Image (cartoon, rainbow, N blue to C red):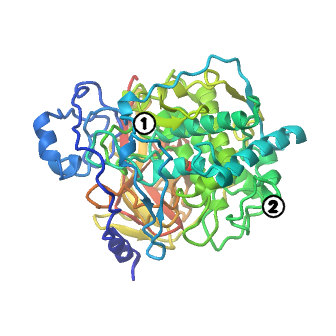
Amino acid sequence: MSIASMMMSSLHVTASSAPSLHPKTFYSSRNASRRPTTCIRSSGDKSGEEFPLIKLDRRNMLIGIGGGLYGTTLGLGHDQKAAADPVGPPDLSSCHAARDLDTTNTTDYACCPPYTFPLPNPESIPSYKIPKNPILRKRKAIQMMTPDELYKFESAIAEMKKLDKTDPNNPWSFTQQAQIHCAYCNNAYYQYKTDKVPLEIHFSSLFLPWHRWYIYFFERILGKLIGDDSVALPYWNYDNPDGMAFPKAYDNPNSPLYDDLRNKGHAYARNYVDLNYGGEPYTPPPQKQLIDENLCYLQTIFNQGEVDPLQFIGCPIAAGVQWGYQYAGLLESLHNSVHQWTGPIASPNFDMGNFISAARDPIFYAHHSNVDRLWDIFRNCFLKTELETTSTDWLDASFVFYDENKELVKVNVKDSLRIDNLGYSYTSMPLVWKDFSKACKIRPKITCTATAVEFGSVPKALVSDPIRVLVKRPNSSRSKSEIQNTLEVVMVDGIEVEHTSSTRFDVFINTPSDNSTHLGDFVGSFTTVAHGHKHGETSDGNEKKLGLKLGITSMVSKLNAEDAESLVVSLVPRMGPVVVGGVRIEQIEKKTA
Ligand code: C2O
């Protein structure tokens, strides 16, 4: 069976038959006139043009019922262009079992939190008041923790795990904490006030702030459990050679930090994480090369993020937009590799290798503490504006958590942006990748003899050989000012993956005049982690396709390629079945945010 037909058949698996618990509610058109988010997506979009406004009037809402609010009624097809409300807190009453649709695994995962009834309407959940504390919690690199600090942290995790046995419905218990992650990313909730649009906090700019709040409360609960507010999450410092190895503290079977469901082939103490991990069979590159490649990858994403912050954090999405209509940020994509490398090889890849179960492994919180830290470093050292985006779709998006007093509270993105306000800090470690002088020269040359041709209109499966595509640039030989005012990006469209597999492909660009077989320079990767639901599963059970957007502005100048009318874009398959629908280059006018 070909990959494409395999994928086709998976499209027909019935979506979770969740009971319709929530009343039909209507989309508010209240904010339909404010500026929409710019995140160009499909080939139909003109470069640099903002999404046209679509007024969501009540009549459209009514027609929308039962047909999937977007797409069908508004005829948006593949383009989700509506300006709408920011993603709101989940409709708690819509919580239903998340389902792993892997045919070999028909288990339902009950991820819903132990709410007490009657369930509050999201609007009546109080907003969280950030305590006005001095900085109390100092998050340290694991390898720098003293035995006392580690002991304190382990005792707190042990207390949390104890609750699993003594009081399993306690929202503070370790399992209940892990379920929060499952619920928010495996379609257990529908978005409030939408017609069953699943709530998913991965694959968009919700990723970083949501996980920041998630581990923030987790950390505060740890403090409560041992009556010591100074207890802080460690971070897995894999951006630094000294912390790149799988942390020893998490690999002691007698420690509460241990988890048995890992890839025993490499996720063990003193073995270095591979951010370029491409699945099994796997022979790690020599350690020095592995370190350099990791540092190179980090440098690449920060440099691209400096040019275009939305690439770093991901694309904002508005409420009611089906998952899969946005782009994951570069940091999220890098983060996926750590999940893939740590989780077990065999499907369903529990724990770290599947979002349903990832937070059951204590290393998850050390991983996310580092992701959170890398975002903070980005904001402090690379972001040239005050905010990554002024889009209210991002800033006003909100979530619900149990706080350290077991109260349900509402938090938003805006309030998450400054960690000093949140009462924790990261002790600094050298940013080796930042001034990594060898830059990325270390990456071994990948060659391929296939000639680059235009992509054409037929989707292609990425199997074992790279696909080399000759892609036209909208404009070439531009003036200096034209170049300065635009972001040049490679867009890969119509990406289909199986939700039960983790996937990855790498993207390289080169000039066509370089007749060599060298694929050129690495510009980024597409990665997904196995999920308990179909990627982009919609309320009508249809599969939506994903996209990838990678900045090449600085690479074009590095390659001296401004005069080239086309570039050779190479897609190198690394892991899992992937089908790609097209490749194009866009030159997007920079917005003055
Ligand atoms: Cu929600 Cu590391 O993923």
As helix, strand or loop, the secondary structure at mark 1 comes to: strand
Front label number (1 vs 2): 2
Q: Is mark 2 within 8 Å of ligand 1?
A: no
Residue bearing the label numbered 2: 253
Residue 38: x and y in percent read: 34, 34
Total labels: the figure holds: 2
| 517 relative position to 341: left or right | left
Residue 429: mark: none
Q: Circle 1: is it few (<14), some (14-19), or many (20+) Cα within 10 Å?
A: many
Q: Quadrant of residue 493?
A: bottom left
| 187 relative position to 159: left or right | left
Q: Earlier in the sequence, mark 1 or mark 2?
A: 2
Task: Please indicate, yes or no, whether residue 493 appears anywhere in the rendered image.
Answer: no
Identified at 33% across, 40% down, the residue is: 192
Confirm or deny contact between disc 1 and disc 2 (CB under 8 A).
Answer: no
**Image: 536 above or below 487:** below
Residue 352: x and y in percent read: 62, 58
Residue 98: x and y in percent read: 44, 58
- Disc 2 marks a residue whose amino acid type is Pro
Residue bearing the label numbered 1: 487
| 146 relative position to 345: left or right | right
Q: How far separated are the C-alphas under marks 1 and 2?
A: 49 Å
Identified at 37% across, 51% down, the residue is: 324
As helix, strand or loop, the secondary structure at mark 2 comes to: loop
Task: Please indicate, yes or no, whether residue 261 appears anywhere in the rendered image.
Answer: yes
Front residue (pair 144, 221)? 221
Q: Where is the C terminus found, in terms of image quarters?
A: top left
Q: Where is the N terminus found, in terms of image quarters?
A: bottom left
Q: Quadrant of residue 331?
A: top right
| 547 relative position to 329: left or right | left
**Image: 64 above or below 109:** above
